[in-house]
Image (spheres, coloured by chain):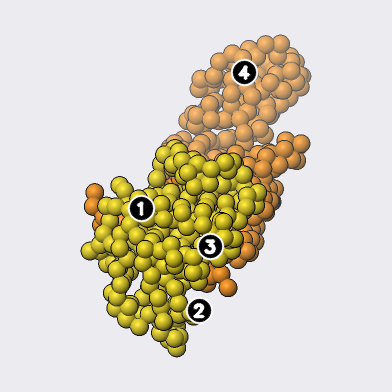
Amino acid sequence: MNDQQRISTRRLHVGRLVIEASRSSKARPVAGIVVLVLTSAMCFLSIATVGRSLAAERDVGSELEGAGARELVVANSGAWDILGPDVIALVGSMEGVERAVGVGAPIDVSNSAIDHGERAPAWALSGDVADVIEIVEGRAPLAGEAVVSVNAQHRLGFVVPVGAVVTRETNGDIPVVGSYRARAPFEDLDGIVVFEPSQEARQLRVVLSDITSASAVQEAVLDLVDPSASSDVSVTSPVTIAQLHENIIGTLGRYGAGLLAMVLGMGALLVAAVVTADTAMSSAEWGRRRALGASRGQLVMLAALRVMIGAVAGAVVGVGIAVAVARSGRWDVDWLFTSAVAVLTVNVAVVATLPPAIRAAWRDPVSVLRTP
Amino acid sequence: MSSSAYGPLSVDDLSFHYGKDGVELFGGLTYTFPRGSLTAVTGPSGRGKSTLLYVLGLLLSPSVGTVSLGDHVLSTQPDAIRSAIRASTIGFVFQDASLDPRRSVLDNVCEPAVYAGLSTDGTRQRAHELVDTLAPGIDVRRRPGQISGGQSQRIAIARALINRPAVVLADEPTGNLDAANTESVLLVLQAAAQRGTTVVIATHDPSVSEAADEILTLT
């Protein structure tokens, strides 16, 4: 290797700089400790405020996204047959629809083995029975068969969910083949469910896959059902809830983002102030390092690494405090958000270091090296 | 690579002034500092002795003219390259030693190796050897505040030599020392010159001029 090769080779030894940054931080700990305190406060405040806001947003979101909130009901009280099995099957196959069933008007039934026994409501059901109920005992009903809810079974006097019920209207028996528990949002169907796949329904009950698609799905369903054909059709819509969901999530999201930006922004300003003060007080050190061969880039990197060491320690402390407070019962820890905040805090602190470090690195070293 | 592998340090038609209205220094100086020699730069105050060292050390750029090492013009290189050259090829000694008071003697001596990217183990071994040679008896774990001024200056010289530089630039290295310490520091710098390093000392001290191989007087 000749002179030119040797003297023109700038090798960036990050490992050596990390060691140097670690040793110089240890030798001059005040700035590092202040950065540690600042970043731990940034981390803790972010997790304690934004993290909790995020948890609240999630809770509200899950409430508003529950099956009950995602239900669209089209009820037909007129004489027109507009909710036949074909319509229900078509709606059930639509994109954005999780479940679609047809429910008939309720009728009273009683245990056929008990004269003048207690009565319970019964609904004819078309569509997939498994979408509405969960069989607890016995088996799923075939066409013309019924199952009884766990509550109604005792009320109607069934020791086991097998037998028959009788309707006052028809006075005919309907075989009972099992018991069920209704799935959300069909908890109101607490009585008897009779599987009648080919019967015209009075209600079309649609559970949407996603509340955000409520408006589009509702439009598609109503296009198919064509409620304008009858003035006796009413629609219970989840669109208002969807709008509310969107507004609440949007508001909470903006609030959280604003709060996070404020906490990290304030922290960044304070870190920059600490680095500015530190570099001003260490101008002789920076001049000496320049004279001994440090490039401006190495000086900036050294300053950033020193802050990074303090910031990493601060993030660990801040997360530790936040987790300890959370575990004391105040709120649940979202580890993904917590990790993201820790990484973001360290990055913000390092980026905040750059302007004062660059300014200091471009300062004339000779002015501080001269001995009067 | 030993320091003798480099060509001589030279300046050609060198002038420098601070700012636009500053006094012009050196007046087109052309000079070659012989390799392996100790040159004393003397002259009245304000003639730019320290400034010449900073120009030779590539911390300042000449207003006119060039600084070269062998056939290679160094002063026109970009700052990053000049820093790399300074790290690998030039050692600085300051009047007040300029050691980091919060770091150990060993860390102070090893500092330039960080910027030159030399290995930690090799550097620490060489630092021990240099301290044993230049300032025997000093515990390298001590802080600069726990050793004398003469010892501090010899530690500063050890730091300047850690990367086996071709050139050592010393700005009034004996300015704060008594006669005995001045003599010991000069012996150390003379020994470095004898091993092939080009040593340039800016000084007011007649004893330094007497010990020098060459004298460059700025008038």
Q: Which residue type carries mark 3? A: Thr
Which residue ends up furthest to the bottom in the rendered image?
Answer: B21
Q: Is residue A315 visible?
A: no
- Quickly name the residue at label 3: B174
Q: Residue at 60% x, 56% y: name it.
A: B149
Identify which residue, A321 or B28, lies in the foreground.
Answer: B28
- Quickly name the residue at label 2: B45
Numbered disc 2: secondary structure: loop
Q: Which residue type carries mark 4? A: Val
- Answer whether labels 3 and 1 touch (C-beta < 8 Å): no
Q: Earlier in the sequence, mark 3 or mark 1?
A: 3
| Chain on which label 1 sits | B
- Quickly name the residue at label 1: B194
Q: Which residue type carries mark 2? A: Ser
- Quickly name the residue at label 4: A136
Q: Earlier in the sequence, mark 2 or mark 3?
A: 2
Q: Are marks 4 and 2 on the same chain?
A: no
- Answer whether labels 1 and 4 touch (C-beta < 8 Å): no
Identify which residue, B173 or A356, lies in the foreground.
Answer: B173
Q: Quadrant of residue B54?
A: bottom left
Q: Which residue type carries mark 1? A: Gln
Q: Residue at 53% x, 27% y: name it.
A: A129
**Colour in which the image shows chain A:** orange
Numbered disc 1: secondary structure: helix
| Chain on which label 3 sits | B
